[in-house]
Image: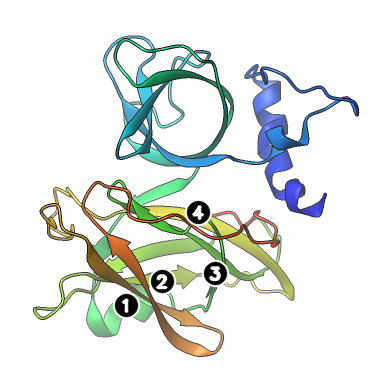
Amino acid sequence: MKKYLKWLFSFTALLSIGIMPQSCSNDDGYDPSLLLPNAIVTLKPADGTPSFYIQLDDKTTLEPTNILASPFGEKEGRALINYTETGEDSEKYDRKVYVNWIDPVLTKSLVQDLGDENDSKYGSDPVEIADSWVNIAEDGYLTLQFITFFGNSGIAHEVNLLNAGTEENRYIVEFRHNAHGDYSSSLASGIAAFRLDGLEDGLGLPDTNGKTVKLTLKYKSFDGEKTMEFDYCTRKATESGNIDTESEYRIKLR
């Protein structure tokens, strides 16, 4: 039951604003599968009603039947969702779904590599990248779940992703974390997504033109500098994630 707790707050909050599950009853009086996300998606604005649609992967779009407006408003953003298939076809999208709940993920653009000023601007507090199925380069975003120490003080930890590409390799990014002094012996995790392409400020990664390339992620761990690689193809899904982490998802982020 512990692994369900990190999603319980979001689920309860959504109930309070009237986004009710389609069904939450079984022999025990509830359906535990509704407490966990079953997809990491992109919410995209659309004309008409509903005013957004759900990009499940590069081949599948979903029309929400019970929610008219996106929590991101007119912007695009990543989110964890729990949805149920309705079996209905959609006129504009691939199919209709009933959304049991949506948990928006902090979604940011890439920031500029400032060299020697990176530590003072973006912080240098260590993290570990969780062994999590939400860690994926997909639909033009890199979504990451990380683990670090926090003090449950209400202080928001700041996270950023730098465009650290070079002339030899344009597909390098660096994760930065600033705890803003919120340190303790308690471990928890946070989730953030970063837009990799199509950025008006010129910081976006080059279009891969349909090819899949290796995207290198650099980050500071508790054991020193580390890297990991993702398969990346502009605006497409390239891989599936691994198992979810047991760490509690409760760090306040900005």
What whole-number distance in Å separates the C-alpha atoms at marks 2 and 3?
10 Å
* Marks 2 and 4 in Cβ contact (< 8 Å): no
Check disc 1 and report the residue beneath it: 118
Q: Position of residue 151 (x, y in %)?
A: 70, 66
Mark 4 or 1: in front is 4
Q: Amino acid at mark 1?
A: Asn
Q: Amino acid at mark 2?
A: Arg
Q: Which of the marked residues, 4 or 3, is nearer the chain's N terminus? A: 4
Check disc 2 and report the residue beneath it: 176
What whole-number distance in Å separates the C-alpha atoms at marks 4 and 3?
22 Å
In the image, residue 101 above or below residue 144: above
Check disc 4 and report the residue beneath it: 134
Left or right of 135 on screen, residue 183: right
In the image, residue 82 above or below residue 233: above
Q: Position of residue 155 (x, y in %)?
A: 60, 59
Question: Does any portion of residue 62 appear in the rendered image?
Answer: yes
Q: Which of the marked residues, 1 or 2, is nearer the chain's N terminus? A: 1
